Amino acid sequence: NAGVTQTPKFQVLKTGQSMTLQCAQDMNHNSMYWYRQDPGMGLRLIYYSASEGTTDKGEVPNGYNVSRLNKREFSLRLESAAPSQTSVYFCASSVDLVVNYGYTFGSGTRLTVV
Amino acid sequence: KQEVTQIPAALSVPEGENLVLNCSFTDSAIYNLQWFRQDPGKGLTSLLLIQSSQREQTSGRLNASLDKSSGRSTLYIAASQPGDSATYLCAVSLTGNQFYFGTGTSLTVIP
């Protein structure tokens, strides 16, 4: 099925370890996003990519880096994981940066940092 | 920063009942607003998107309204079904790109 695919679905890291969350979409969307969802808080934007080759910070970018590898793929990297980064991470895409047709979300990556 | 509030946090209704979910936001100069559905352990599904120039959008049994001047949106679900049980999230954008999400209303429809 067409959509947004995230890997892995679950991950446990030790404090200080690094990892990359992968996201790929096959809908030919130009814009992609990384959000985190924490209990009692709404989803918060970490980084976004308006189009291939561009990335920008969102509301909570500290501790993360991103790469827009090509039009399909947008990865999120944690260089030195901290317990505060325990969260559910969602990747999303849209036709363009100005969202006139809605988002398509992946199913999420549940990350625990111990 | 845009603050988005959804009340109530949880709602339980018997099957067949019509219901309204509420969303309020602090900055009325919005570009658009989306309503999403989230099932446990799953991603979000976009239900309806309302542009700032629109007052409502409809999809099947769902109707979303927007009142920018009062900073409110409502999601109306007609003839609720057990399959409607999920968390419903409201998200508001000032520029069309970065969305600010509410914490959601968890809906349970009792058969």
Image (cartoon, grey):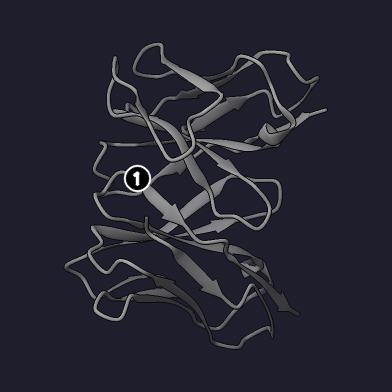
- The foreground one among A108 and B60 is A108
Residue A75 seen from this side: no
Q: Position of residue A59 (x, y in %)?
A: 43, 40
- At 70% from the left edge and 29% from the top edge, which residue is drawn? A9
- Which amino acid type is shown beneath numbered disc 1? Gln
User: Vertical placement of A37 versus B108: above or below?
Assistant: above
User: Residue reaching furthest left?
Assistant: B53
User: Vertical placement of B18 versus A39: above or below?
Assistant: below
- At 76% from the left edge and 80% from the top edge, which residue is drawn? B111
In the image, taking residue B41 as reference, residue B62 lies left or right, namely: left
- At 27% from the left edge and 24% from the top edge, which residue is drawn? A51
Count the numbered circles shown.
1
Q: Secondary structure at mark 1?
A: loop
Q: Quadrant of residue A13?
A: top right
Q: Residues within 10 Å of mark 1 (few under 14, many from 20)?
A: many
Residue A70 seen from this side: yes
Q: Quadrant of residue B38?
A: bottom right
In the image, taking residue B29 as reference, residue B77 lies left or right, namely: right
Q: Position of residue B83 (x, y in %)?
A: 65, 67
Chain of the residue where label 1 is placed in the rendered structure: B
In the image, taking residue B59 as reference, residue B78 lies left or right, namely: right
User: Vertical placement of A82 versus B110: above or below?
Assistant: above
Q: Position of residue B99 (x, y in %)?
A: 38, 50
The residue wearing badge 1 is B98
- At 48% from the left edge and 77% from the top edge, which residue is drawn? B22
